[in-house]
Each structure stands twice: as C-alpha cells, then as structure tokens.
Amino acid sequence: MNDTDLVNAELAARATGLNKFFIYKLAAAGKLPSYRAGRALRFSIPELRDWMRHEAEKRQAVGVNVVR
C-alpha cells in the first residue's frame, strides 16, 4: 500500500491504534480528516498521522499527559 492511498476505518484504526468505532465517531463529528466515497468513509494515513501529531501538541500545550 502506498502512503497516498485512502483506507477504510479498520485500516485507519490499525494505523493509529484507535478503536474503529472511535474513528467513525470522530469522523462524523468532523474532528478527523476523512473522505466520502459514496456511503463509505475513507482516510489518508499521512493525514491521520498529522492529525495525531497536532492533537498531541495541543494536549501538551495545555498540560495534559500524552502517552506515546
């Protein structure tokens, strides 16, 4: 798989370590970068990694403990 490929929620969950249902919840709330392909949601692994990095930086800025 190429880093520019779009993946489904299950593969996005594996790549991020998040629960698949949490991936869906964040995407539905507009908090996670995602794309619609018909009725299906697709995710870009590099965009998910950037999102995770940004979220970790935000948490560190307010003093929340971040587990890596």
Image: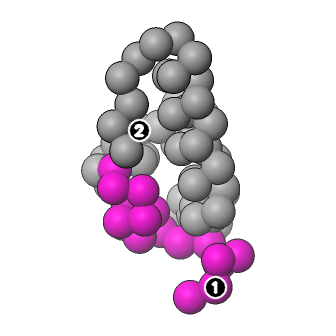
Say how the picture is coloured.
one colour
Q: Quadrant of residue 3?
A: bottom right
Q: Which residue is at the far bottom? A: 1
- Compare marks 2 and 1 and give the one earlier in the sequence: 1
Mark 1 neighbour class, 10 Å CA radius: few under 14, some 14 to 19, many 20 or more: few
Q: Nearer the viewer, residue 47 or 30?
A: 47
Q: Secondary structure at mark 1?
A: loop
**In the rendered image of this protein, does residue 20 appear above or below residue 37?**
above
Q: Are marks 2 and 1 in contact (CB under 8 Å)?
A: no
Q: Nearer the viewer, residue 15 or 33?
A: 15
Q: Secondary structure at mark 2?
A: helix
Could you tell me which quadrant the C terminus lies in? top left
Residue 19 seen in this snapshot: yes
Residue at x-position 58% and y-position 65%: 45
Q: Which tag is nearer the camera, tag 2 or tag 1?
A: 1
Q: What amino acid does circle 1 point to?
A: Asn
**In the rendered image of this protein, does residue 2 appear above or below residue 63?**
below
Q: Which percent across, then down, holds residue 17?
A: 33, 55
**Pointer 2 residue:** 25
Q: What amino acid does circle 2 point to?
A: Lys
How many numbered discs sit on the rendered protein? 2
Q: Which mark is residue 42?
A: none
**Pointer 1 residue:** 2
Q: Which percent across, then down, holds residue 35?
A: 66, 57
* Alpha carbons under labels 2 and 1: distance apart: 25 Å
Residue at x-position 64% and y-position 62%: 46
Asked whether residue 33 is drawn in magenta, I would say no
Residue at x-position 64% and y-position 85%: 2
Could you tell me which quadrant the N terminus lies in? bottom right
Magenta part of the protein: which range?
1-18
